[in-house]
Amino acid sequence: MDTRIFRVTDENRNMAAAREAVEEAGKILQDGGLVAFPTETVYGLGGDALNPESSRKIYAAKGRPSDNPLIVHICRWEDMSLIVREIPETAKKLGKAFWPGPITMILEKSDRVPKETTGGLSTVAVRMPSDPTALSLIRAAGGYVAAPSANASGRPSPTLAKHVEEDLGGRIEMILDGGQACIGLESTIVDLTEEIPTILRPGYITKEMLEEVLGKVEIDGAILPEGCKTAPKAPGMKYRHYAPKAELTIISGEEEAVVKRINALLKEAEKKGLRSGVIATDATAGRYGATFVKSAGSREREEETARELYRILREFDEEEVDVIYSEAFEESGIGQAVMNRLLKAAGHRMEMAGGAV
């Protein structure tokens, strides 16, 4: 299959060719095909959420386990009523505060949503993205687009169209290229079927932001570092994700100790003839003796770190490094989401500078 790529940006969005490309992409989805498209978080791999065969195609294209639910993307609030049994007050509050935007709600599904889309669960994950191309595509497709991240299962999520092409070129009908994703991490997932809303996946919308709207919010223990051996509530969180090809190890601790430990590991790797990479920050990038050192930005700008993480992991793959050492990041605010993704990418391989974690 030839995968067509069409660029849709702020500059050409209202031009006839771009509108026609989005309409064509919508028709592909209506006919049961697959289209990758930009969102504000990462690129999504879209199929008709109400068509069981489309969901099967998504799993096949990604090599994704079939018990890993797909998020249903909508473009209008009123479209929620078709796919959920009821809309609780908590959902209304979150929708008013954060939609369109990077938050996904877990609700009891209606019979209109096939089990293939929900991974066999009685609940459905619903999100309304803010990216204008995504919203236009959802509208053109009929209002309900199931879309996980548009990468091969287990690989770092795509924040550029070229990442999608690397993983899924030849497997899907079309890619809408909207440039770099502005957030760079997947949406926050909140389970609203429990008495107390529970974060199943951290993201740009933080626990503190949610509590300003809902009051008390809990975090699923399985997504915390100390809970890595706990079975997660969201099936999709129990698999290794976001992983580069190289072995990744996270080093935590005070800055001086971390720099010293990573440099020691780099020397060991060099003796073994291994190509090494380091994920550092602006403040430390010049202090490492590796050929490939990449800064994830300033620790004072968490959004920058989130936006750059997956791009950095994929660049290490292109450079064919054998081992990667990453500094740890603060596990608060957006930093919690960054560390969640890093830990999963590393298979929870983390070391305290001066002693194992």
Image: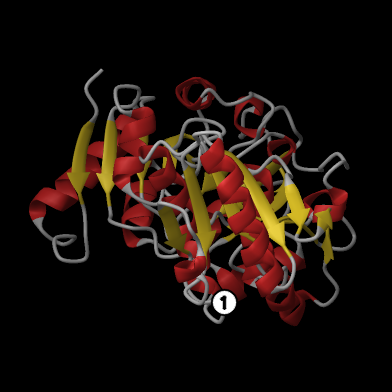
At 61% from the left and 68% from the top, the residue drawn is 95
At 68% from the left and 77% from the top, the residue drawn is 209
In this image, 26 relative to 75: left or right? left
Q: Is 219 rendered above or below residue 116?
A: below
Q: Is 45 rendered above or below residue 204?
A: above
Q: Position of residue 349 (x, y in %)?
A: 73, 44
Quadrant of the rendered image containing residue 271: top right
In this image, 101 relative to 15: left or right? right
Residue 16: in sight, yes or no?
Answer: yes
List the single residue furthest toward the left.
16
Quadrant of the rendered image containing residue 68: top right
The residue that disc 1 covers is: 299
- What is the image's colouring? secondary structure
Instruction: Give the tally of numbered discs.
Output: 1
Identity, as a three-letter code, of the amino acid under mark 1: Arg
Closer to the camera in the image, 8 or 85: 8
Residue 128: in sight, yes or no?
Answer: no
Q: Position of residue 32 (x, y in %)?
A: 39, 25
Q: Position of residue 148 (x, y in %)?
A: 52, 40
Closer to the camera in the image, 195 or 157: 157
Q: Is 272 rendered above or below residue 298?
A: above
In this image, 294 relative to 323: left or right? left
Q: Position of residue 64 (x, y in %)?
A: 57, 26
At 63% from the left and 49% from the top, the residue drawn is 265
In this image, 94 relative to 171: left or right? right
Closer to the camera in the image, 46 or 163: 163
Quarter of the image where the N terminus is located: top left
Mark 1 surroundings within 10 Å by alpha-carbon count, few (fewer than 14), some (14 through 19), many (20 or more): some
Q: Say which element carries label 1.
A: loop
